Amino acid sequence: MTKYKIIEIRGIVNSSGHDCTLVIANPVMRNGDSAFSYEYVCPTEYDDSKHFVFYDDKDEYMIEELLGIANNNDYWIPDLQEFEPCKSFLNGTSVTLYQHKSYFGNRFAVAEIQNTISMDYYICQVSFNEGRDFYDLGFDAEKWEIGDKIIKTDHGSLKIKNYIFVEEGPLVGIQFSVEGSLRLDDFEKFNGFDDCPHITTFALMRQPYNAWLWVYAFDVNGNQVVNFCGRDELDGLSDFVHKLKRKYNQ
């Protein structure tokens, strides 16, 4: 992998109005192959500079790390497989921007993960204001796969880090800690600011003697960004929970 030196880090706003961080980095070059050769870096932006974009609400820890690298004048070796190149205009000039994968809702290796235990979840309603107003999508509008390793939806996949079983008063279900994003602008009624929020908590809940299953999704700041109402197959949730507990001896 090519080594880079970071020459500039600054804030920008993308075409969708999101606050982003632009990192401009220049490749480290070597003058010859002899014992007297040396490495050098162009100190200003030029044709071989690379432009990396990070989304402030999803990549804050990575941005902090890059600021430390730049302040210490260290090398940076980015993994280009974690970025998706696209043509864009920057200061009136056409450039290739390498956008970090967090923006694209897991169109990367996470989609290749396979569950060993799973259940089907059929959604029919969605709410973007903490469940105060639900919009009908149609009965069984979408079928998602909720598993022990990954949650696969029509709007992005969420990699499962861990989970807990919930039995609190009238609510029973599973709360997952996850990594990934959901493309909320896929829904016609969505009118929020962050159209592809990074999700860290995905809770699947049912009230006793209620046929409906409810999903509560929270972002990295603990904000409830979307709710779904839907159903499982007959005994789908209870069978899924039983298999999870048996597999992990809980």
Image: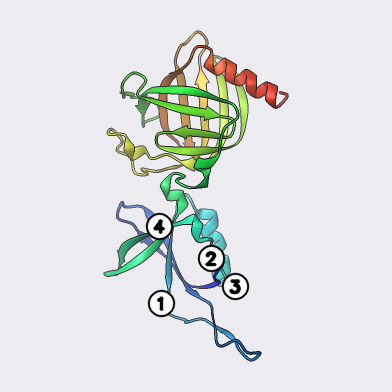
Q: Amino acid at mark 2?
A: Leu
Label 4 or label 3, whichever comes before in sequence order: 4
Q: Quadrant of residue 128?
A: top left
Q: Earlier in the sequence, mark 3 or mark 2?
A: 2
Tags 4 and 3 touching, CB below 8 Å: no
Q: CA distance from mark 2 to mark 4?
A: 14 Å
> Could you tell me which residue is drawn at 42 percent across and 25 percent down?
143
Provide the secondary structure element on which disc 1 rests: loop
User: Could you say where residue 188 lies in the image, as x and y percent from the top left?
Assistant: 27, 34
- Disc 2 crowd rating (10 Å Cα; few below 14, some 14-19, many 20+) is some
| Along the line of sight, the residue nearer the viewer: 31 or 98 | 31
| 209 w.r.t. 45: above or below | above
Residue annotated with mark 2: 67
- Tell me the kind of residue under disc 1: Glu
Q: Disc 2 on helix, strand or loop?
A: helix
Q: CA distance from mark 3 to mark 1?
A: 18 Å
Q: Amino acid at mark 3?
A: Asp
Q: Which residue is mark 3?
A: 74
Instruction: Name the kind of residue labelled 4 in the image.
Output: Cys
| Quadrant for the N terminus in the image | bottom right
- Which is nearer the N-term, disc 3 or disc 1? 1
Q: Residue 250: horizontal and vertical position, in percent?
A: 71, 23
User: Residue reaching furthest top?
Assistant: 209
Residue 94: x and y in percent read: 29, 68
Disc 4 versus disc 1: nearer the observer? 1
Circle number at residue 45: 1
Q: For residue 140, which quarter of the picture?
A: top left
Which residue is the extreme one toward the bottom? 36
Q: Residue at label 4?
A: 20
Q: Which residue sits at x=49%, y=28%?
A: 145
Q: CA distance from mark 4 to mark 1?
A: 19 Å
